[in-house]
Amino acid sequence: MLAEYYQAILRSQDMMRREQAFAACAVCAGKDGGASCCFAGAEEWYGEALLLINLMLGVELPGEGEGGQDCFFNGPQGCRLLAHFAICLNFFCPELSQRLGPDKLAQLRRLVGRELVADEALEGALLRWFRARGVTVSL
């Protein structure tokens, strides 16, 4: 399941990279005053299961944020996580949506949808595994 999720992440990230969406988001996120969807407090959406998945994928979780008014996980090159919360993947600002156009935006939404389905399956399996052992883990 982890390998399937990782492949889904790579497919959506590949399109984001090809369409230069990451670059556009990094510029927006770097604006003063929390001008993007990566605002301070967004890190609170991440539960233990999703952070564990990031660790399982080899992500080194940051010990501290970059400061400012951005999400704790936002760094100089954008998000420092590999596995993302649903809203982080589903939100496309009007500028980015317009730049992508309806066809590419629909294609990207399909890839993101597959990524989210793989995430939900993996998180569910992890939660069941922990619960069977009497461990409470938050989504």
Image (spheres, grey):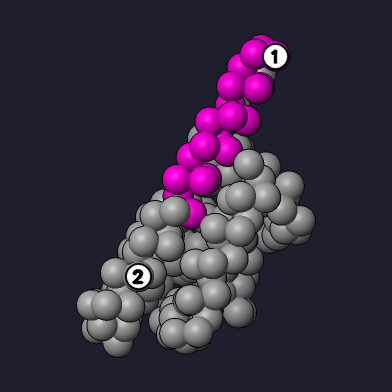
- The magenta segment: 115-134
Give the class, few, some or many, for how many residues have Cα within 10 Å of label 1's Cα (few <14, many ≥20). few
Main SS type for the magenta part?
Answer: helix
Residue to which mark 1 is pinned: 133
Instruction: Measure the C-alpha gap from mark 2 to mark 1.
Output: 40 Å
- Amino acid carrying label 2: it is Gln
Quadrant of the image occupied by residue 134: top right
Q: Is residue 3 above or below residue 121?
A: below
Q: Is residue 76 above or below residue 133?
A: below
Q: Residue 99 vs residue 59: left or right?
A: left
Residue 129 visible (yes or no):
yes
Q: Secondary structure at mark 1?
A: loop
Residue to which mark 2 is pinned: 107
- Is 121 within the magenta? yes
Mark found first going from the N terminus, 2 or 1:
2
Of residue 103 and residue 53, the one placed in the foreground of this image is: 103
Query: Residue visible at 42% across and 60% down?
Result: 112
- Amino acid carrying label 1: it is Arg
Query: Residue visible at 27% across and 77% down?
Result: 103
Query: Residue visible at 71% across and 53% down?
Result: 57
Of residue 67 and residue 107, the one placed in the foreground of this image is: 107
Measuring from the top left, give residue 61's x and y in whole percent.
Answer: 71, 56
Residue 138 visible (yes or no):
no
